[in-house]
Image (cartoon, rainbow, N blue to C red):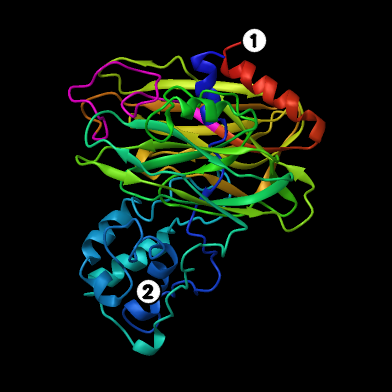
Amino acid sequence: MTLRTMTIWALVVLLGSRDGSGQESGGIPPAGPGKGGAVTFTRDIAPLVFQNCVSCHRPGEVAPFPLLSYEDVRKRSKTLLSVVSQRLMPPWKPEPGFGEFHDARRLSDDQIALFRRWVDAGTPEGEAALLPPLPKFSEGWQLGEPDLVVKMPKAFTVPAEGRDVFRCFVIPLNLEDDRSVSVVEFRPGNPKVVHHALFFLDTTGKARELEAKEREPGYPSVGGVGFLPSGGLGGWAPGAFPRPLPAGIARPLKKGSDLVLQLHLHPTGKPEVEQSTLGIHFSKEPVQKFTFGLPIAWRRIDIAPGDKAYVARNSFTVPSDIDVIGVTPHAHYLCKEMKATATLPDGTVRGLIWIKDWDFNWQGQYLYKEAVHVPKGSRIAFEYTYDNSAENPRNPSSPPKRVTFGEQTTDEMAFLFLQIVPRRAADAALLRLEALRSLQGRP
């Protein structure tokens, strides 16, 4: 297998846990219109903050400060108004009308206007009796105790400096029977250094052989994972919360499989220790269908310095009927806009996802509220736009340099991952083959 092919397989199973707070819109009433006087925190603003912000802005989570109280919000009110007005926060990137997703955190224009009225009025607190209760978050595992908890057998030390580290760690599962997985919850041992994680399955023992050749835990995996995975259990990125697959749908987990955890690790300037843990939940209901990831990509990226509008596009014609239950677009720092559509055989165009302001630091894995049916013969296409100029504040190179496809974050990528369910189980092999042919540039 070529390095390019391994790169593809190293990304095929990115879809897994999905971006979101894990909190549905129920439970906290929507913000009121500020009736009967000035907008107040307790009546109008607290519901917005509790629903959309505190999943991350609380102790022990990724945000740098809490937003749990009136005083927390008041003292940062002008900053918060600025970021919500620019739609930088809450970090929800998909445009409305291009897919309806679970866990959406997008504020409406009216809600943003309400927040502005509160700030302009001097941030009044309001009546304490009107303050809604804080959302309840699970302590420990977000979805309760997993059926199987596994951990990297040994800790790995991330060097203080140098390039990003891509490394695989083999975790024997020791399963004696085939199982079906509804969701995997990932816990990085050291969130400061883990950029993202992918969960592969190996029934061949090849990953064990690769790891046995190394002195340190794991083995290097730039360009791929070094073997042809027998399956995958998804992935994780900061800000992602576990959401079980829809009822009756699961990921297959064969007996005798090893879990191969691929980590993308960032040096921080000092040595850091990482030892991740995963919790696996098995399906409790009869499984009717299995899901897997179908990737579409453009790898012939070559962006000249100063090019403000480089476009990468590709398409894939679906060889059989599928349901798309999730979508994950992926690129690096230079990408600024991404759009994906499905054109049906009758000419109907369905928007799958559109992000006008892509931000590498807020990648999402999006699960549709209702599966998108894509019949045989439909064309799924994406178009990504990149800005490699000095005016791009997210450009990692100063001055700009020529950028091509690659694994490092200073390189670029153009991937669209679809989490699909074949209408007919027998079509799964055909779909995988056609997707791989497309990724390799074959006709």
Q: Which residue position is annotated with label 2?
A: 46
Element class at badge 2: helix
User: Is 208 rendered above or below residue 57?
Assistant: above
Element class at badge 1: loop
The spot of residue 68 in percent (x, y) is 33, 72
Visible in this render: residue 88? yes
Residue at 60% x, 51% y: name it: 183
Q: Which residue position is annotated with label 1?
A: 443
The spot of residue 428 in percent (x, y) is 74, 30
Report the amino acid beneath label 2.
Ala
Q: The magenta stretch spans which residues? A: 393-416
The spot of residue 407 in percent (x, y) is 39, 25
Horizontally, is 396 left or right of 107 in the view?
A: left
Quadrant of residue 292 in the image? top right
Q: CA distance from mark 1 to mark 2?
A: 55 Å
Visible in this render: residue 369? no
Report the amino acid beneath label 1.
Pro
